[in-house]
Amino acid sequence: MNAVAEMPSPFIFTDSAAGKVRDLIEEEGNPDLKLRVFVTGGGCSGFQYGFTFDEIVNEDDTAVEKSGVTLLIDPMSYQYLVGAEIDYVESLEGSQFTIKNPNATSTCGCGSSFSA
């Protein structure tokens, strides 16, 4: 018997986030777009999150697919984001993509900056 075990995803890409990405891709009219989540230096706490759309999947990217859309994370950002939840939240304060990151030792009030 050849059973193939599916590896668990290193990230949680919520239904809400995947749905919003799908809506944004449909608005752009380019089905080749993927959501790239990355970490850069800077921000109030030392690192900050970034989001962009990308058509190119690099050889060393980690890709997570959900509901027909793809989330991409580069190797440098991977180490800071493994185990994180990427979500899209609509509230009275506004609508935005959010990251709940178990690797962050502290975050700032803006929610887009953290230290590891």
Image (cartoon, grey):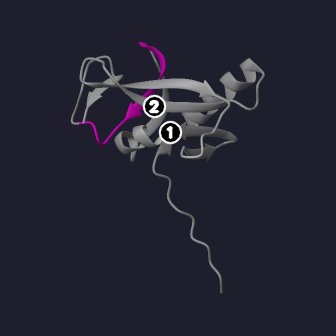
Magenta stretch?
92-104
Q: Earlier in the sequence, mark 2 or mark 1?
A: 2
| Residue at the image position 54 percent from the left and 46 percent from the top | 60
Q: Is residue 19 among the parts visible in the rendering?
A: yes
> Element under label 1?
strand
- Horizontal and vertical percent position of residue 63: 57, 45
Are there few (<14), some (14-19), or many (20+) residues within 10 Å of tag 1? many
The amino acid on which the numbered mark 2 sits, given as a three-letter code, is Phe
| Residue at the image position 55 percent from the left and 31 percent from the top | 36
> Element under label 2?
strand
Q: Residue furthest front?
A: 59
Seen in the picture, residue 83 relative to 111 is either above or below; the reply is below
For label 1, the residue is 73
Using residue 77 as the reference point, say whether residue 1 is left or right of it. right
* Quarter of the image where one finds residue 93: top left
Question: Which label was assigned to residue 101?
Answer: none
| Residue at the image position 70 percent from the left and 25 percent from the top | 25
* Quarter of the image where one finds residue 57: top right
| Residue at the image position 45 percent from the left and 31 percent from the top | 38
Quadrant where the C terminus is found in the figure? top left
The amino acid on which the numbered mark 1 sits, given as a three-letter code, is Ile
Label 2 – label 1 distance at C-alpha: 6 Å
Q: Nearer the viewer, residue 81 or 67?
A: 81
For label 2, the residue is 38
Q: Is residue 84 among the parts visible in the rendering?
A: no
Seen in the picture, residue 51 relative to 76 is either above or below; the reply is above
Quadrant where the N terminus is found in the figure? bottom right
- Horizontal and vertical percent position of residue 5: 57, 70
